[in-house]
Every structure is written in structure tokens, then in C-alpha cells.
Image (tube, rainbow, N blue to C red):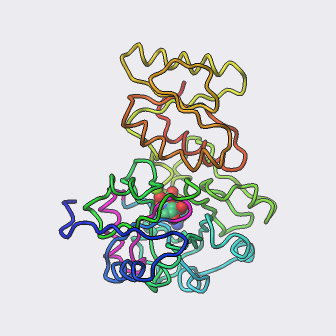
Amino acid sequence: MSNHPNGTRILKVSPKRPSTKAILAAANVIQHGGLVAFPTETVYGLGADALSPKAVRKIFEAKGRPADDPLIVHISDAAQLQELAKDIPKHALKLMKEFWPGPLTLIFEKSDQVPDIVTAGLNSVAIRMPSHKIANALIARADTPIAAPSANLFGSPSPTTAQHVISDLHDKIDMIIDGGEANIGVESTVLDVRKSPPTLLRPGGLPIEALRSCLGTIDVHPSVYGDRLSAADVAISPGMKYRHYAPRSPVYLIEDSTDMIRGKIQETVDRLRKDGKRVAVVVPVDFSYSADEVMVVGRDPTHIARNLFAILRQLDRKVDAIVIEGIGAGGLGLAIMNRLRRAATVDV
Ligand code: TXA
Ligand code: MG
């Protein structure tokens, strides 16, 4: 798409006390079929009026996103769900009561109100109620559900700051609300609640442990662990077939729960450097690795999640390859490992 004719307006807005004037300006853009990037508690979203196919089409164009990858519809009030979903099962109500607003997206059977372009022709719809004050106020003021994928170019890591959005989408969208850093740093958890027990399609900001303590059993889709997908699996959630969250520099994910991992990491770095590549390592603890860049991230999954995409973007500018040590799958670890497996192009 060519440059946006009127340029992109950037509004700085307090995430704690969003100014009404700014929110009204952004809501006005949405109501006129435009695109607004805005912060949520997970990552920045690129929003358009979910009920306007023309507006939603612009999202796909700006991102370069394939039309078969459905969008999440964001609401600010549970009452909006009635017009978007056909059937709201009991276990979904329980989850909504406990976890909405928050980083949990639920998949329902879709109503006829939801345009096909939003759901990529599927008969299901993904719905989430964000807890971020700016997101919530924007949806409420726009007075319409807002379809919003992550506000990055297709295939690049999700944006956790307005600066990331600017570097991907400047001049391609109408407005960017700069509300500071997204707090969680990985996208929402996506759960298909059409059947009981529900199925986890994408691990994210709400850990599976929390879902289990609310409902008991949760099925886990094979893609969550990075397995190869069958055609039937792809049909359930088309977005999963794409290589995501990928920086341009190849990512090498090293997993080994023993001390052998240190040697494996250094060997991988050495091999790549011998090929003339500049190499970064991202590790919980530095064991005096010799590399062009060593990024120590500790072992706290909450901290790693918050910084993960920013680190990938930053290293991508500096080096030719990124070697990352895997972490445990507890808490946000499952989401982190899922993103890393999908970013990693090469098995070691
Ligand atoms: O945290 C988030 O979820 C962020 C913020 C902006 O809310 N949004 C986000 O959207 O990550 P996106 O488009 O980058 O990822 C949406 C995921 C995709 O993997 C897509 O395939 C899946 O949700 N999805 C959307 N609608 C679906 C549906 N009807 N059935 C199955 N999967 C669906
Ligand atoms: Mg995305």
C-alpha cells in the first residue's frame, strides 16, 4: 500500500488517566472507518470498526496480512457479546466472570452480525475484552466492537511500544496512540470454548494453570507445542500455520535441561561466527559466552515476556543470527516457548 495520504497522527496518552479528548479523537477515526493503533495490556493492536468490512479490509492491507488469518474482535462491555456470538456456553460465562477484562480471547460460534472478512470466512469468532484503560475507553467511545490484530507488519514480532508500531506502520494508518509499554508483552491466550472441555489454541498472557484452576480440564491443541499441523488443524485456526514473530535474523532455539546446554549454545555460536555471521545469545545466566552480543534475561517468565519482542527487534538490527536458550513451560513460559519455536527457523 502506498503512503497514507494525510500522514499518521501520533497521540501521547496517559495509560492510567487517558485524556477524554484524545480518546474521542481516536474513536472518531474508528467511526469514520479509519485505522487506529492502540495499546492493550498484551501488545499494541491495530483497530478498525469490526462491523465495517471496508474498514477491516484496510487492516489486512496495512499489515500485509493474508486474508485467511482471522481477527480478534475487542469489546468493552459483556453486553456486546450477545450480538457477536450465537451461543455462549456456561463454562465460557464462568471464564468471562473470572478473567474478563484481561488477556483471554474466547472463540464462539459467530452471529450473522460479524462480517466474513473479520473471521476469514470461519463460522466462529474470536472475542476479547482488554483491561487496558486506553483500549477499553476507545472501544466504549467508538461505540462499536473493534477488530484488531497485533499492530506489526505481518511476520514481524508483535509491537510492545508505540515506537515498534511507528517503525512498522508509519504512514500506513491514520493514528497511533502512544500509551507507553504494553505490560504483559505476549499476546492474549486464545481458547476455543465451543465445546467442553475447551481447547487452548494459543498460549498467551493468561497462563493455562489459571484456566485449569477455573474449569478443571483444558485440552491443548498440538500447535501449542510447535508440532507440525495437519490440514484439519490448520482449518481450526488458520493463523497457526504461518511462521510468526520472526525477526529477519534466524533464531536458533536451544533446549536442554542439563548443563550440556552451555556447550551447545557456544558450539552453535561458534559455527555461525565461522560463517562470518554476527551472533547474539539470549540466556538466563551468562556463562562467559563468547559472542557478538550477550543478552541476560534471567529466569522470571513474566519479565522475559515483557521484554521478549523488544529484544528480538533490537537484536535483529544488530546481528545476523540469534541463539536463544529455552525456558521452562510454567506460567508465561508456555507462551514464550510457543513464540520462540515459531520464530526459530532452524532445528539444532
Ligand atoms: O493480545 C492479543 O490477542 C492482541 C491484542 C491486540 O488484542 N491481538 C492479537 O491478534 O494477537 P492477532 O491477529 O495477531 O492474533 C489473533 C490470533 C491468530 O492466531 C488467529 O488465527 C486467531 O487469533 N484467531 C482469530 N479468530 C479466530 C477464530 N475464529 N478461530 C480460531 N482462531 C482465531
Ligand atoms: Mg499477530
Residue 282 pos. (x, y %): 54, 32
**Within the magenta stretch, is there residue 292?**
no
> Which of the 4 quarters of the picture holds residue 149?
bottom left
> Which of the 4 quarters of the picture holds residue 89?
bottom right
Q: Residue at x 31, y 82 (%)?
A: 32
Query: Could you tell whether 67 is left or right of 113 in the image?
Result: left
- Name above or below for residue 228 compared with residue 266: below
- Name above or below for residue 194 compared with residue 290: below
Q: Residue at x 58, y 83 (%)?
A: 77
Position of the N terminus, as image quadrant, is bottom left
- Name above or below for residue 344 compared with residue 286: below
So how many labels did they put on this image?
0
**Within the magenta stretch, is there residue 43?**
yes
Position of the C terminus, as image quadrant, is top right
Front residue of 125 and 214: 214
Residue 270 pos. (x, y %): 48, 15
Front residue of 58 and 222: 58
Can residue 173 be seen in this snapshot?
yes
Front residue of 340 and 290: 290
Query: Could you tell whether 125 is left or right of 148 in the image?
Result: right
> Which of the 4 quarters of the picture holds residue 27?
bottom left
Residue 114 pos. (x, y %): 46, 79
- Name above or below for residue 138 compared with residue 196: below
Residue 219 pos. (x, y %): 72, 56
Q: Residue at x 36, y 72 (%)?
A: 56
Q: Which residues are magenta?
A: 40-66
Can residue 235 be seen in this snapshot?
no
Query: Could you tell whether 176 is left or right of 259 in the image?
Result: left
